[in-house]
Amino acid sequence: MKKLIIIGGGASGFFLASNIHHSKWKTIILEQAKKPLQKLKISGGGRCNITHACFSPNKLVKYYPRGSKELVSVFNYFQPSDTFEWFLQKGVNLKIENDNRVFPESNSSQTIIDTFIQQTKKENIEIHYNSSVITIKKFKDKFEVITTDSSYYADTLVIATGSSMKMWKILNQLGHTIIPPVPSLFTFICNDPLLHNLQGISFPEAEIHISSIKIKEFGPLLITHWGLSGPAILKLSSWSARELYKMNYKFILRVNWISDTFDNAREELIREKEKHPKKSVYTLKIYNLTQRFWNNLLENLHIHDKNLADLSKKDINKIAESLTNTQLQISGKNIHKDEFVTAGGVDLKEVDFRTMQSKLIPNLFFAGEVLNIDALTGGFNFQACWSEAYIISQLLNSI
């Protein structure tokens, strides 16, 4: 019987092992941690955002800043609808939430972990914990995997270690090109006085823009105690991960809080002035802005308590400009909650995405974030793991 070693006891490794037939392969998972699937356990706030309800491969790949072209064929083979079916067959019901994120109905990542543990037991998969790989050697038709406490030999090797600097170094020594990793999916640190004491305030339709790299995003924006977060910020950080790294995460962010034009905002203010001239500017209610934000904005502009009738043309222009084009100095980044996503990894040009096999080393396969593939938040990174691992499993089961 042929031997298969899977390095990495995370999402990709366990999904692959759960689909390998023990009648075909003697399979071992090597995991350096004491417990399996720890990243999966904390994902989605402990609920496990298992995939995203996007059932068109051509639309699905648009959520991947790196790897979109290569993943078209992968998702045509195994996509979110197949993920639903696979877990349903294992007795796990999934649910689609309003934002199309998908979770187990139990709202617990432990449900998914238990499913994988049961499947690997069913397929007689050996799992070796506390097993840290030191090096990998390739002979004619065999791999030797040397760990801190033992050596293993395999006919086929799958790397599913996620973002591991140590494994990337080993793969580089074997001849693979590694795209240097940089953070992706992060929030922005900003200490501008405008944001002081506004944590928790959100803007459902904001536009953000970094002029220096000509990138824009649109969507919900959240003020936090350290700066800015929300889907718009996370999307922008993901798509521009490398550019922001080169800028050392210090740049000017332009924010349109209301997603309207300067001219429209100015006209709205003029109309309110004409309709309610005796009304205090602090009590003005426009664009569903919160009172705290509105007060901060006025104080930041040094427009003190005036009646609308007393607002000059210059005042009105300043308010309209601040609503539609606030310039904020970003001074750094923060990791987004429990998301740990990296842009970088094995160069995609060196992988055959029809099989997930290395183009340089026969019988060496890759799955998951060890590759230079990453996605937006919402279950997309996990879906890439399931799809890539499934392709490998079906190929190996057919040998």
Image (spheres, rainbow, N blue to C red):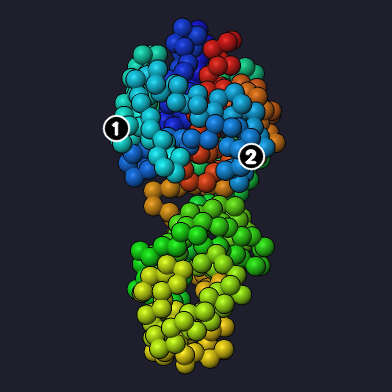
Residue drawn 47% across and 90% down?
A: 309
Question: Crowding near pointer 2: few (<14 within 10 Å), some, many (20+)?
Answer: some
The numbered disc on residue 68 is 2
Q: Quadrant of residue 36?
A: top left
Residue 298 x %, y %? 44, 82
Q: In the image, residue 167 lies at what x, y percent? A: 52, 38
Q: Nearer the viewer, residue 378 or 175?
A: 378
Classify mark 1: residues with Cα within 10 Å, few (<14), some (14-19) or many (20+).
Answer: some
How many numbered tags mark residues here?
2
Numbered disc in front, either 2 or 1: 1
Q: Is residue 156 visible?
A: yes
Against 7, residue 204 (above or below) is: below
Closest to the observer: 219 or 114? Answer: 219
Q: Position of residue 96 (x, y in %)?
A: 41, 35
Among numbered discs 2 and 1, the one appearing first in the sequence = 2
Q: Taking 136 as reference, is 346 above or below it? A: below
Secondary structure of the residue carrying tag 1 is loop
* Res 48 quadrant in image: top left
Taking the image as shown, residue 367 lies to the left or right of residue 307, namely right
Q: In the image, which disc is placed on residue 106? A: 1
In the image, 28 versus 285, the foreground residue is 285
Image quarter (top left, top right, bottom left or bottom right) of the C terminus: top right
**Residue 160 horizontal side relative to residue 279, left or right:** right
Identified by mark 2, the residue type is Ser
Q: Residue at x 57, y 67 (%)?
A: 260
Residue depicted at x 30% and y 35%: 108
**Mark 2 touching mark 1, by CB under 8 A?**
no
In percent of width and height, residue 144 lies at 53, 24
- State the residue at coordinates (48%, 35%): 53
Label disc, if present, on residue 144 of the rendered structure: none
Please name the amino acid that badge 1 sits on: Ser
Spatial distance from mark 2 to mark 1, Cα to Cα? 31 Å
